[in-house]
Image (tube, helix red, strand yellow):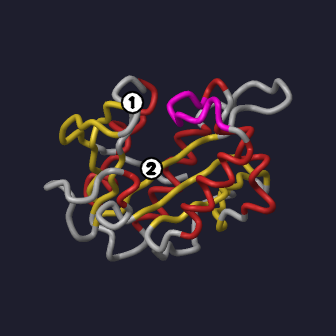
């Protein structure tokens, strides 16, 4: 999957490079704040193996996100009908022009307080990047139904829950954001 390179503001995305990024990624996905990532007990080798599968998959990409040059988030984009390990392939709601998205904002480092509005700013930038591809009609997410924080952010961005589905390890809210809903609801930084 190709995602255009332009992003708004000081936020950038680059392909995840496991040799460089796996230790940082392990720190992020095993942090207590990342409980919905379902990798709390993952070893460094587990993270390396799982993300090697993502990086090598022709329809699933992992991106290291930076804010002001500092590694700050992980984004994934995928073709929901051609990345069967995500669990959406074959669902009747999935259509041509859909792109899946996962987003993990790193926990604050060194005891610094969280930056107010950072997650929403990153979320807006990643959505802008997804919709920069004219072939993308909708962005698909499948957060855990227990994740109230992301449910709020998704709704603010224009996502609508289609239905709840069972995925490995979670009950998920299958949700879609159309290009039109995104344009109407989300102000890009």
Percent x, y of residue 47: 66, 47
- Residues at marks 2 and 1, CA–CA distance in whole angstroms: 16 Å
Q: Determine the residue positioned at 58% across, 60% down.
A: 62
- Between residue 97 and residue 11, name the one nearer to us: 97
Q: Nearer the viewer, mark 2 or mark 1?
A: 1
Q: Determine the residue positioned at 26% across, 56% down.
A: 178
Position of residue 80 relative to residue 26, above or below, is below
- Quarter-wise, where is residue 66 in the image? bottom right
Position of residue 5 relative to residue 179, above or below, is below
Q: Classify mark 2: helix, strand or loop.
A: loop
Q: Determine the residue positioned at 27% across, 70% down.
A: 97
Residue holding disc 2: 187
Q: Determine the residue positioned at 59% across, 31% down.
A: 34
Are there few (<14), some (14-19), or many (20+) residues within 10 Å of tag 1? few
Report the label total: 2
Q: Is residue 166 left or right of residue 29?
A: left
Percent x, y of residue 107: 69, 33
The mark nearer the N terminus, 2 or 1, is 1
Cβ–Cβ below 8 Å for labels 2 and 1? no
- Between residue 22 and residue 146, name the one nearer to us: 22
Position of residue 123 relative to residue 31, above or below, is below
Are there few (<14), some (14-19), or many (20+) residues within 10 Å of tag 2? few
Q: Residue furthest right?
A: 110
Q: Is residue 182 left or right of residue 52?
A: left
* Quarter occupied by the N terminus: bottom left
User: Is residue 111 within the magenta segment?
Assistant: no
Q: Which residues are magenta?
A: 34-42
Q: Classify mark 1: helix, strand or loop.
A: helix
Residue holding disc 1: 152
Percent x, y of residue 54: 54, 61
């Amino acid at each position: 999957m190709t995602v255009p390179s332009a992003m708004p503001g000081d936020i950038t995305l680059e392909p995840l490079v496991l040799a460089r990024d796996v230790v940082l990624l392990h720190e992020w996905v095993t942090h207590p704040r990342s409980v919905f990532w379902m990798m709390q007990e993952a070893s460094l080798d587990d993270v390396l193996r799982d993300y090697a599968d993502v990086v090598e998959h022709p329809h699933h990409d992992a991106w290291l996100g930076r804010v002001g040059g500092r590694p700050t988030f992980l984004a994934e984009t995928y073709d929901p009908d051609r990345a069967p390990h995500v669990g959406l392939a074959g669902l009747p709601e999935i259509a041509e022009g859909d792109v899946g998205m996962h987003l993990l904002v790193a926990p604050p480092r060194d005891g610094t307080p969280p930056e107010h509005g950072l997650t929403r700013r990153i979320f807006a930038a990643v959505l802008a990047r997804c919709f920069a591809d004219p072939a993308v009609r909708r962005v698909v997410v499948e957060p855990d139904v227990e994740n109230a924080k992301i449910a709020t952010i998704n709704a603010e961005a224009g996502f609508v829950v289609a239905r709840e589905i069972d995925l490995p390890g979670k009950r998920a809210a299958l949700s879609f954001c159309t290009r039109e809903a995104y344009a109407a609801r989300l102000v890009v930084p």
